[in-house]
Image (tube, coloured by chain):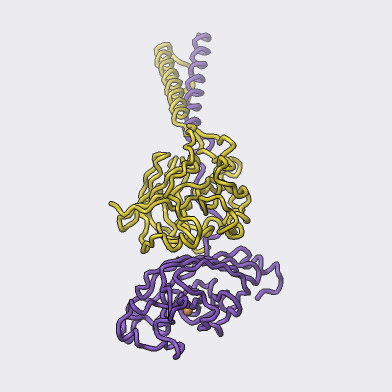
Amino acid sequence: MVEHGAAAPSQRARRRALSLVFMLVGVAVVVFAIVSQVNAPTAPGSAAGTIDPPQSTSASPSTSARPSASATGTTPQSSPRKSKSQKPTTQKPRTVKPRTEKPRTEKPGTEKATSRKTRTKSRPLLPPSKPVSISIPAIDLTSEVFAIGKAADGTLRAPEPGPDLNKVAWFEDSATPGQLGPVVLEGHVDTVEGRSVFFDLGRVRPGDEVTLKRKDGRTLSYTVDAVRSYPKSRFPTEAVYGGDISQSTLRLITCSDFDRRTRHHQGNLVVFGHLRTTAAGS
Amino acid sequence: MSLTPLAAQADDGDAMYRATLTELNGSGGSGSFMLTVDGDDATVEMNWNGLAETFKDGPFPHVQHIHIGGQGKCPTPSADKNGDDVISTPEGQASYGGIGTTLSVKGDTSAKSATDITIAPGGSSLDYKRTFKLNADTRSALKDGTGVVVVHGLDPSTMSKKAQKAKSPLVSSLPLAATAPALCGPISAAPTGGADTGTGSTSGIEHAGLFGLGGLLIAGGVLAGARLRKTAKAS
Ligand SMILES: [Cu+2]
């Protein structure tokens, strides 16, 4: 980079200019690199909400609640069932831009599905129809949704480089929105290109709304129950792919806990939710 | 099945299976199925609704099974060979196979109890949880992805006149409606492990290359400047 040999006085000015240009460009490049740093994604509070969707609005946990669903029993970080009156989050989670948590207001009528018997009979049935788009207003997220399956080794495939890389994927063996059981969706937190569609998923809080639009035009609204992070080695398969299958539930999965040493994400962030309303519309 | 508990653990220790049940023969029902394997045992959780409610003034019996040995699929309308607009249980067999396990509410869970309506769930909806010993055939079918959940029992009023009068091809004392499939769902294993949904590109330092390039440029400039000063002093 640096020229060698004795410099004639005429060359000196040129060299001085050159060295100055080098330094200026260098500084500019470094400044650009600093400015374009992206904040690491938000980690969820360790106890945001309860995973099990509400079973009952009346405070009678003994009547219809079946022996604590397998979901809670096997999840390493799940907190014990809390009564609805308790505030779901006690610890303030680390957030990039802290959002004030919406109070969980109980609207009469929206959760009238109380005992499992009456719910199963009153819940309107929807024929299967794949999700085509998702929106989470609380984090300004909207995305197309495409179907994805399992890889040959039995793991869930992730969106691959190409037009679908930064879209949300629906696991094709999971329920479609409005059917009984979990609708399982996943998205990248980041890719080699930088932040991806679920970058802000860790900022979602219990009570937030997630809407899914189906291919048949129906839009369904889900309410977030819990946001959890798990080490990948102890991923709660039963809670994520099963859980309470007596109603339509929602799971949003992305990566979490980046380990700088291994250069890999050590964990998965999972948002748990349940169906609130069925809008016939659109 | 397995020689040691350890082998069972390694084999399918935390295997979990799921199926979404959709209507057959226009039953109007839907449901969900979940099976977790724990050693030799299986725990089945099942919820469905929207099926025929009463039969001869009693709860409509809905025999239900894990079918095995077929293609692991649910039949399409073309499976109706005799043209009565109903896919009977035998007509669907090419798709979902024969009976591997009977999902009864109590007692025997083998294929022998397949049509025992006295231990079948009844009514229009079901909230079911039962743990039982899973037989080897069903277990291997689940692994192969050829297990299918089928719930039987149609509301006769939704069937064609011809089908309403027909007898069950399985149990001659029952009408076709009692044993014709009403819900069907191919069983699939839940994905193993978590999701691979990140590269870490936004964690730690991005554009490490740019920092390197910038650093090199600055160093180059400083070096060149230093040489200039030296030569200036020397002359
Ligand atoms: Cu059957």
Residue B106 in the figure: left or right of residue B209: right
Residue A80 locus on image (x, y percent) = 62, 49
Residue found at the very far front of the displayed protein: B57
Chain shown yellow: that is: A
Q: Position of residue B126 (x, y in %)?
A: 49, 68
Q: Residue furthest left?
A: A282
Residue at left offset 46%, top offset 29%: A33
In front of the other: A170 or B233: A170
Residue B92 is at least partly visible in this image: yes
Quadrant in the picture for residue A280: bottom left
Left or right: A135, with A79 as reference point:
left
Q: Colour of chain B?
A: purple
Identified at 31% across, 58% down, the residue is A216
Nearest the viewer among A50 and A20 is A50
The relative height of residue B190 versus residue B225 in the rendered view (above or below) is below
Between A119 and A206, the one nearer to me in the picture: A119
Residue B208 seen in the current view: no
In the displayed structure, B164 sits above or below A109; it is: below
Residue B36 in the image, given as x and y percentages of width and height: 58, 66
Question: Is B147 situated left or right of A142 in this image?
Answer: right
In the displayed structure, A174 sits above or below B147; it is above
Q: How far from the left and from the top, in percent, is residue A44?
A: 54, 41
Residue that lies at the very extreme toward the bottom in this rendered image: B172
Disc tally is 0
Q: Nearer the viewer, residue A197 or B101?
A: B101
Q: Quadrant of the N terminus of chain B?
A: bottom right
Q: Is residue A232 above or below residue B151?
A: above
